[in-house]
Image (tube, grey):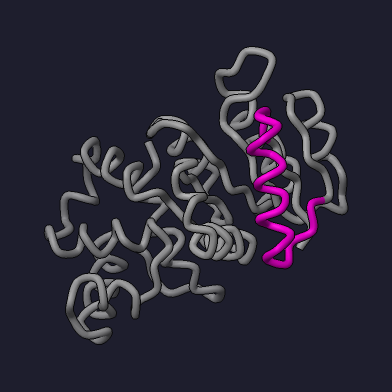
Amino acid sequence: MRLVLAEDSALLRVGLTQLLESRGFEILHAVDNAAALDEALADPAAEAAVLDVRMPPTFTDEGLRAAITAREARPGFPVMVLSQYVEALYARELFASGTGAVGYLLKDRVSDVAEFAEGVRRVASGGTVLDPEVVAAVMARRHEEPLERLTPREREVLAQMAEGRSNAAIAQRMVVTEKAVAKHINAIFTKLDLPVDEDDHRRVRAVLAWLRV
């Protein structure tokens, strides 16, 4: 998997490069500013990107904007966004495209190397990964239909789906059976009006429906 890596801190950029390469990824481009990031994302050989939300020159949302532009040019292009703080608005903007293959993690999560690498792989495979703190921030602001149809238990399951957890992982965390988790997920799909389709991407679309403004 060939990645574009964007991080303005030289120390963190080198660390991320070594970490990802040790896990089997190839760093195609490692850049430290918005202009270089735009150029790197235009490389057709790039298969996914791991990037910081805030990049030079203004340190506001350059990384996010570059990610959104890249996904407009290449729908479904996998992007894992890293941020220093919980910025739920940025998360919703990134997920608002309506497709999967996106992740949003706080930089503190990188300290768990195995979990971070697995998150990048999940996103590169078309899944979604959302930091638990971002999940909590978004959940606190979600009150409109059809999400109001969900029970508290179903909301808990959906929150863990947003974190990218499998049915088995959710069952273990909630101390229930996988069958019970599957029952909750089917109820979520029904209440969010997500019928079965040919690709059966309902899991991704359920998370996107929950995140969308």
For residue 201, side relative to residue 44 (left or right): left
Q: Residue 7: name its quadrant.
A: top right
Residue 142 horizontal/vertical position (percent): 24, 40
Which is the main secondary structure of the residues drawn in magenta? Answer: helix
Which residues are the magenta region? 7-27
Q: Residue at x 55, y 76 (%)?
A: 198
Does the segment drawn in magenta span residue 10?
Answer: yes
153 falls in the magenta region: no
- Compared to residue 209, the image places residue 25 above or below, namely below
Q: Quadrant of the N terminus?
A: bottom right
Residue for point 72% across, 49% down: 17
Q: Looking at the figure, which quarter contains the C terminus? A: top left
Query: Residue 204 location in percent, x, y?
Result: 46, 61
12 or 96, which lies in front? 12
> Depth check: 55 or 8 in front?
8
As rendered, which of 175 and 12 lies closer to the eye? 12
Q: Is residue 127 shown left or right of residue 138?
A: right
Q: Is residue 188 left or right of residue 7?
A: left
Residue sitting farthest toward the top: 58
- Residue 137, how many percent across, how many down? 28, 38
The total of numbered circles placed on residues is 0
Q: What is the residue that sits farthest to the left in this orientation?
A: 152
Query: x%, y% of residue 135?
Result: 32, 47
Q: In which image quadrant can residue 188 be found?
A: bottom left
Q: Residue at x 55, y 51 (%)?
A: 102
Please identify the quarter of the rendering in which residue 69 is found: top right
- Pick the residue in front: 67 or 146: 67
| Residue at 37% from the left image edge and 45% from the top image edge | 211
Q: Eyeballing the image, is 60 above or below 130?
A: above
